[in-house]
Amino acid sequence: MSSVVLAFDLGGTKTSCALVSGGKILEKSEEKTVKTDTAEDLVAQISKMGKPWVDRAKSISVATLGLVKGASWSAPTLGLKDGKNFPLAERIYSSLNKDVTLVNDAQAAAWGEYRFGAGQEKDMLFVTVSTGVGGGLVSGGRLIQGKTGLAGHIGHIQIDPHGLKCTCGRKGCLQTYVSGEGIAFSGQAYYEDATTKDVFAQAKKGEKWAKDILDTSTSLLTIAISNAKSMLDIEVAVVGGSVGLADGYIGMLREKMSEEGDMYSVEIVEAVLGKDAGLIGASDLSLKS
Ligand code: ADP
Ligand code: ZN
């Protein structure tokens, strides 16, 4: 009982709830995240999902999209009227009555991979290449969250101030080129309604335009990972997400990384915890705090 944590993963599309112990999921449920303009409805959904299991848990941990600053939470992309500096931890505490730890979802996933997955307890950057590009940093045995919760958000490194509009409001962030959405958007210049999977399939068939799109995605991500080494001296990059783990993607990254000299080269490994990384990492962080 003592090491069991009730963990949530609050995403824009889905919300998961699980009982987690020692990096293992004991029970898990998943629902579509309610469509709403108020954070209170999200609290109600989390409370309802957690009620059946909360008595078995020592504490509560929430991996969430958006920015976490201590116990408060901001989710600029959800369009909530109360979504800025919302007291999410306190609101969940008042309905489920156990201590609540909040963590950004990619940062939680980074910690999960570090402790129980592919990170091998090395200084690492976690990168998830999915609809967007998320990230998290672990250095010297600590998850680096930052005062405003922004640390590790590699997808929002700006690479072209005149580039495509990003979901964060800025132009030309890395994810606008590298992510699934970026890859699909680039593919649509070649045929209507191209999806990310279509681009991968066409590249496999040898279509030059599709190979070029994946080449751009993996080249830019390799540069960003090497830059992370120059800033933080990371030893390993753990790459996950449906695009990151799609056929051939990691191979391309490794090939590009092999062209870097030793000083800036980073070992690239596949994430192994999949969609549970956030739940597992968040639960472990709640036991630490
Ligand atoms: P999320 O963004 O919700 O975390 P995923 O990690 O599954 O979810 O990423 C979704 C993105 O991955 C979408 O852009 C989708 O088109 C793309 N995708 C899903 N499966 C594949 C695949 N087999 N090959 C290439 N891209 C894929
Ligand atoms: Zn951005």
Image (tube, grey):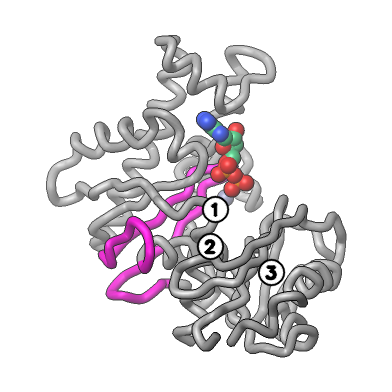
How far apart in space, not on screen, are marks 3 and 2 (Cα)? 18 Å
Quadrant of the snapshot with the N terminus: bottom right
First along the sequence among labels 3 and 2: 3
Residue hosting label 1: 275
Q: Is residue 90 magenta?
A: no
Q: Is residue 74 left or right of residue 21?
A: right
The crowd level at tag 2 (other Cα within 10 Å; few <14, some 14-19, many 20+) is many
Crowding near the residue tagged with mark 3, few <14, some 14–19, many ≥20 C-alpha atoms within 10 Å: many
Q: Tell me the distance, in whole angstroms, between the alpha carbons under discs 1 and 2.
A: 7 Å
* Element carrying mark 1: helix
Q: Is residue 117 visible?
A: yes
Kindly check if marks 1 and 2 are in contact, taking CB atoms under 8 A apart as contact: yes
**Is 101 above or below relative to 145?**
below
- Residue pointed to by mark 3: 74
Measured in 3D between alpha carbons, the distance from the residue under mark 3 to the one under mark 1, in whole angstroms, is 22 Å
Query: Disc 3 marks which amino acid?
Result: Ser
Q: Which residue is mark 2?
A: 278
Task: Residue at 20% x, 49% y: name it.
Answer: 264
- Residue 172 visible, this orientation: no
- Toward the viewer: 5 or 14? 5
Seen in the image, is 277 located left or right of residue 269? right
| Label 3 or label 1, whichever comes before in sequence order | 3
Q: Residue at x 48, y 23 (%)?
A: 200
- Magenta part of the protein: which range? 115-144
Count of marks overlaid on the render: 3
For label 1, being within 8 Å of ligand 1 is answered yes
Q: Hey, which quadrant is residue 214 in on the image? A: top left
Q: Position of residue 161 (x, y in %)?
A: 52, 43
